[in-house]
Image: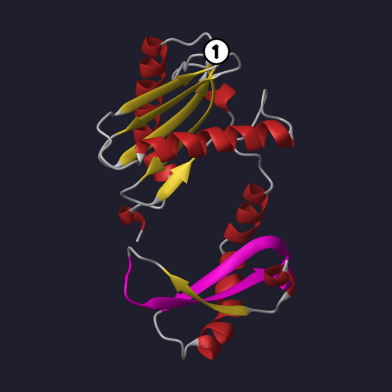
């Protein structure tokens, strides 16, 4: 809330993939005066002496976005719900209806993607429980000396699956009736879909 209310906030950031030994500095402001109160503009500098330069340039950046018609589109997108698992259960992806939710983490890009939380994860307690299950899977996968690429934990309420490769970690929540074979098939379909949609899901090097 402090970021939203401030005219502009200056803060150091650690970006290990940029430089593990130094901070960058971010000027953060919301574009209230330009009619986009839910859009946050972040300007990043490598020097801590650039506060006034970035502060002075925020209006010109915002005005350029307005002139290009981009800012209104960003504001609209900010209010759109995230994609849901049901979308992937339709052709052409045709993901199994056993899949209730998933988290895909790219260790190479240090970014993740996940669908919005829908039934049976519509209440806070069920969402917290799901996140704890994901945390447990990640803990077991990252234990020292682990060798398995896939981990399956079944219970009466759901089946949790973790699948890991060199640059990818995929965590799934499936129905309790899901089999190992159906879990593997689901992993394959999700990975193919993410590969196809990578440019729209992640900030990739090609965007810079």
Q: Is residue 181 visible?
A: yes
Q: Residue at x 33, y 26 (%)?
A: 150
Location of residue 86 in the rendering, given as x and y in whole percent from the top left corner: 58, 22
In the image, residue 118 sits, relative to residue 205, either above or below, namely: above
The image's colour scheme reads: secondary structure
Q: Position of residue 62 (x, y in %)?
A: 60, 71
Tell me the quarter of the picture where residue 145 sits: top left
Q: Would you say residue 42 sits in the magenta stretch?
A: yes
Total labels drawn: 1
Quadrant housing residue 169: top left
134 or 79, nearer to the observer: 134
Residue drawn at point x = 54 percent, y = 70 percent:
42
User: Which residue is depicted at the point 41% across and 77% down?
Assistant: 23
User: Percent x, y for residue 203?
Assistant: 41, 52
Classify 10 Å Cα crowding around label 1: few (below 14), some (14-19), many (20 and above).
some
Residue 83 visible in the shown view? no
Quick one: 163 or 39, which is closer to the camera? 163
Q: Element under label 1?
A: loop
- Residue 185 falls within the magenta-colored stretch: no
Q: Which residues are magenta?
A: 18-45
User: Which quarter shows the C terminus?
Assistant: bottom left
Q: Is residue 23 left or right of residue 135?
A: left
Q: Please state which of residues 10 and 59 is positioned toward the viewer in this rendering.
A: 10
Q: Residue at x 32, y 75 (%)?
A: 21
Image-based side of 124 in relation to 178, left or right = right
What main secondary structure does the magenta stretch of the protein show? strand
Query: What quarter of the picture does the N terminus occupy?
Result: bottom right
The residue that mark 1 highlights is 176
Residue 5 picture location, percent across and down: 75, 72
- Say which of 69 and 33 sits in front: 33
């Amino acid at each position: 809330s402090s970021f939203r209310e401030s005219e502009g906030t200056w803060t150091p950031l650690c970006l290990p993939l940029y430089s593990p030994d130094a901070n960058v500095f971010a000027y953060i402001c919301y574009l209230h005066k330009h009619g986009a109160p839910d859009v946050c503009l972040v300007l990043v500098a490598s020097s801590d002496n650039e506060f006034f330069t970035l502060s002075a340039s925020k209006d010109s950046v915002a005005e350029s976005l307005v002139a290009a018609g981009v800012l209104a589109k960003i504001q609209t997108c900010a209010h759109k719900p995230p994609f849901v698992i049901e979308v992937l259960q339709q052709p052409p992806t045709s993901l199994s209806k056993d899949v209730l939710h998933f988290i895909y983490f790219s260790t190479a890009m240090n970014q993740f993607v996940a669908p919005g939380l829908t039934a049976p994860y519509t209440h806070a307690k069920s969402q917290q429980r799901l996140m704890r299950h994901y945390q447990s899977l990640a803990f077991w996968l990252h234990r020292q000396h682990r060798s398995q690429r896939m981990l399956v934990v079944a219970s009466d309420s759901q089946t949790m699956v973790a699948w890991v490769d060199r640059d990818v970690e995929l965590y799934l929540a499936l129905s309790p009736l899901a089999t190992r074979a159906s879990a593997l098939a689901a992993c394959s379909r999700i990975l193919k879909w993410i590969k196809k949609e990578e440019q729209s899901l992640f900030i990739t090097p090609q965007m810079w």
